[in-house]
Structures are given as structure tokens and as C-alpha cells.
Image: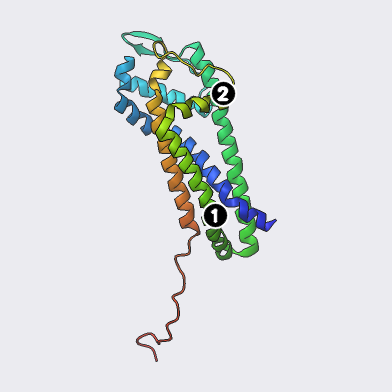
Amino acid sequence: MKKLIYNLILPLGFLAIFMWSVIGVSQNRSFYDKQYQNNGTAEHIGIRHQDLMSVTDNLLSYMVKQRPDLEMQYGVKGEIREIFDEREKLHMIDVLNLYMGVIYVASAITLAIAAGLFYVIKKDGWHTARSILNKKYLGAAVGLGIFCLVFGILIVTNFQWFWTHFHYVFFTNDLWMLDPRVSIMINMFPLNFFYAMVTQILVVFVIGCGAVKLMFMDFHREPKATGRMPKGMI
């Protein structure tokens, strides 16, 4: 039982870090603000930047169930209109269900890891448990490196293929296929927006995995004996 827990903590930990990276980046308002400015999104849509950020605030609230719907009206190209049409709203129901699934799974894995850590630390003590996990990190990191390498190659070489097939895998309908001539949503979030988001998620993920390594490292090792008496001692 204990050996199984030791073997599962790091792989599950990496999975949890990846999921929390997705959640953290996708809820980072500053990220949206920066991307809108880089892409000239407000000017392209014909909406004031502050109104675009208000739309984004409402959307992010909806994604964590702090808002019941996406009904909202703002000025676009000189006239007040509903921001999202029915097709966009239906698609966002699918996105919400997927997003909440990620939150629930990430939370469950995190609780399982916490319980596992509590168990092995209680059995072996913190220093022993940390030493064992530090030794196992290298093996787990090989799998992590392969994942990042494959993921990175897909993103750099053909992100459009990756993003299209992501939708085929996780959505059972074609509501995500939006017309940029009429859809505000697709103009808010073009392909290069998601390229930047996925890249940022990977960066946060790698940093998080590095932090785990630091947590398990022992920085207070006793110095090796030299056979000499320290100065000032007899």
C-alpha cells in the first residue's frame, strides 16, 4: 500500500499541477487584457476596451458559476446589441461543463495526494518521505519531459491541427465552429489567443513541477567528515 502511494504521488501531482495551471491561466484577467491589447481586439470588434473587459469579467464569472447566464448588451460599432448569439451561448454551456469537470477532477486528485502524503509522512516521517519522493522524481520527470516535448512540438509545428482535434475529442457537436464574420466570441478568442494561452499554461506547469522538486530536495545535508578538527576547538 505504502509503495503504491509513493509511486502514485508524483504522477498524480504532475496531473494536478497541469489542471490547476489550466484553471489559473484561464481565470487570469491580466492575461486577457494583455492579449486583447496585443491583438487589437477591441478595435477589430468595434467595442470599447473597458467594455470588452467587462464582457470578459462576466464570462470568467460564468465559468466558475458565479453568473447564471451570458446575457449582456454593450455598444458594438455604434449600436447596443447582445454580445453573444444563441450558438455561442450553447457552446459555452459545453465549455462550462468541461471546465467544471477539470475543477472537480483537479480538486479530487489534490485531496488524494494530500491524503497520500499524510499517510506516508505519518508512517515514515517527513525527512524519509521527502528523500524517497526526491529519488523517485527523476523517473517521473522522464514521463513529464516526454509529455512536454510532444505537447510542445504539436503546438509549435501545427497548433491549428492540435486545437481542432482538441475540440473533436472533448466536444460532441460542432457548436464550436463559429463564423468570424458574425461571431464576437471567435473574434475575442482567435487562434493566436489560444496559442498564447496554451503556451502560458505549459510555462506555469513546468514552473509548478520545478517547485515540487525544490520542495522535496534536502538543502540541509550534514557536511562530510574530513578527519580534521575545526579551528578554535581542541
Which residue appears farthest toward the front when viewing the image?
157
Tag of residue 171: 2
* Image quadrant assignment for residue 56: top left
Residue at 43%, 42% in the rendered image: 204
Residue at the farthest right position? 1
Residue 117: image location, x then y, percent: 60, 55
What element does badge 2 sit on?
loop
Task: Say which of 50 and 11 sits in front.
Answer: 11
- Where disc 1 sits, the SS reads helix
Badge 1: few (under 14), some or many (20 or more) residues near its Cα, within 10 Å? few
Q: Are marks 1 and 2 in contact (CB under 8 Å)?
A: no
> Residue at 39% of width from left, 11% of height from top?
181
**Which of label 1 and label 2 is nearer to you?**
1
Question: How many numbered marks, from 0 up?
Answer: 2
Q: At 54% across and 43% down in the image, what residue appears? A: 16
Residue at mark 1 to residue at mark 2: CA–CA distance: 34 Å
- Location of the C terminus by quadrant is bottom left
* Position of residue 4 in the picture relative to residue 223 (left or right): right
Q: How dense is the environment of label 2, judged by Cα within 10 Å: few (below 14), some, or many (20 and up)?
A: some
Q: Amino acid at mark 2?
A: Phe
Q: Report if residue 173 is visible in the image.
A: yes
Residue 81 percent across, percent down from the top left: 40, 9
The spot of residue 175 in percent (x, y) is 52, 16
**First in residue order: circle 1 vs circle 2:** 1
Which amino acid type corresponds to the residue marked 1 in the rendered image?
Gly
Q: Which residue matches tag 1?
A: 139
Q: Nearer the viewer, residue 86 or 67?
A: 86
- Asked whether residue 197 is in view, the answer is no
Q: Quadrant of the N terminus?
A: bottom right
Query: What residue sits 61% from the left and 41% below the top?
Result: 108
